[in-house]
Amino acid sequence: MRRVYHRFPLRCDLDFDLPYPFIDVVTKIVSMNNTHVTQRIGEDLVKLDLRISIADERTNMVPVEDIPGLLDDITDEADFMLRMNETILTGDRKIPRAETIYYLKIKESGMMSECFATKEGDKGSTDAYDVKKLISGAFEQ
């Protein structure tokens, strides 16, 4: 079953190919749900919390954990929504910074996967290239 979102943005900030089969890429993206990474942005240590949703019935996005057997019936194309909540970590406390939303389309292309990433709005300090690094980095672990 294709999981396509009818309101997926027409413009794309970044398109790239991953040398992995479609189902492997989808599995990695789903496994990144409810995880976090930390990185330095300028002088600040920033924690990025990841929440992942997938298209459901072409009209809405549903958290991946709410769809049982998701990986068993998905085929050739999937649209995801990645929510990145940025929090500045200091010695004393955590300071909320921004929430950034990305739309990510994954298409099967033989033994490779085509990926299209689009940022919604201009909040946050990340960009579509950071999404590519997150996904590519998940395969290197």
Image: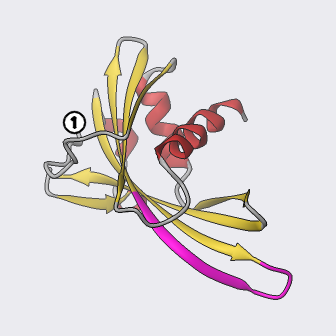
Q: Main secondary structure of the magenta part?
A: strand
User: Where the N terminus falls, by quadrant?
Assistant: top left
* On screen, residue 65 above or below 93: above
* On screen, residue 70 above or below 49: above
Residue at x 55%, y 60% (from the top left corner) = 125
Residue at x 52%, y 45% (from the top left corner) = 131
- Residue 64: x, y in percent? 39, 56
- Residue 66: x, y in percent? 36, 62
Residue at x 59%, y 81% (from the top left corner) = 96
- Residue 21: x, y in percent? 45, 20
Find the residue positioned furthest to the top: 110
Q: Residues within 10 Å of mark 1 (few under 14, many from 20)?
A: some
Q: Is 94 in front, or is 59?
A: 94
- Residue 15: x, y in percent? 38, 30
> For the magenta stretch, what is the residue range?
90-101
Q: Is 98 in front, or is 108?
A: 98
Dot 1 corresponds to which residue? 2
Find the residue positioned furthest to the front: 42
User: Where the C terminus falls, by quadrant?
Assistant: top right
* On screen, residue 120 above or below 75: below
SS label for mark 1: loop
Q: How is the image coloured?
A: secondary structure
Residue at x 27%, y 32% (from the top left corner) = 77
Whether residue 119 appears in magenta in the rendering, the answer is no
Residue type at the position of mark 1: Arg
In the image: residue 100, left or right of residue 42: left
Q: Is 119 in front, or is 112?
A: 119
Find the residue positioned furthest to the right: 91
